[in-house]
Image: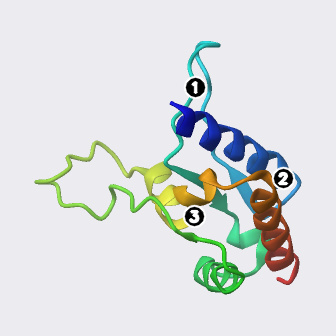
Amino acid sequence: EDYNKKRHSRAQELIRGTSDNAVLNPLQQVLSEESYLPAYYKLPWLFEDVKSGCPRGDFINAIQAEGVAIDVGFRGFTRRSNKRCRQVGPMINSRIASQQTVILHHPALLQDSEYASLICRAIQKVTSSF
């Protein structure tokens, strides 16, 4: 439980620290109850490559070069066969999520606030260079 609290606290710091970034939009959980605390395993953002003018892969390479453990995220259901995953329609949101999601690996969420600040600065540095 202490790990959950720490990851939640770091996730909130990172969400606040990147809130003014036009290229990354955090995917936040909506809390249904005050006592409910999300157990962040990874922290996702949608990478707006249209706004940045940079492909997601180039962003990932650049942010990883800064030492930040961000990688591609949700693979989506659109590439799965009908045997494995029945599809009722075109699954547009799943396709968008699979093309735009980037995730921060959970060990970063167990670090201190200073480390979260370093991540925010690295994200700002990389996204402002596009």
* Disc with the residue nearer the chain's start (1 vs 3): 1
Residue type at mark 2?
A: Gly
Q: Quadrant of residue 7?
A: top right
Residue 81 x, y percent position in the rendering: 18, 60
Query: Which residue is disc 1 drawn over?
Result: 37
The residue beneath circle 2 is: 17
Horizontal arrangement in the rendering, residue 46 relative to residue 66 (left or right): left
Label 1 secondary element:
loop
Q: Give the vertical position of 36 relative to 17 (above or below).
A: above
* Secondary structure at numbered mark 2: helix
- Front tag of 1 and 3: 1
Three-letter amino acid code of the residue under disc 3:
Val
- Give the spatial CA distance, label 1 vs label 3: 22 Å
Image: 115 above or below 129: above
The 10 Å Cα crowd at callout 2, few under 14, some 14 to 19, many 20 or more, is: some
Q: Please name the residue that numbered disc 3 is placed on.
A: 102
Please state which of residues 95 and 102 is positioned toward the viewer in this rendering: 102
Disc 3: CA contacts within 10 A as few (<14), some (14-19) or many (>=20): many
Q: Residue at x 83, y 60 (%)?
A: 117
Q: Earlier in the sequence, mark 2 or mark 1?
A: 2
- In the rendered structure, are the residues bearing label 2 and label 1 in contact, judged by CB atoms less than 8 Å apart? no
Q: Residue at x 86, y 77 (%)?
A: 125
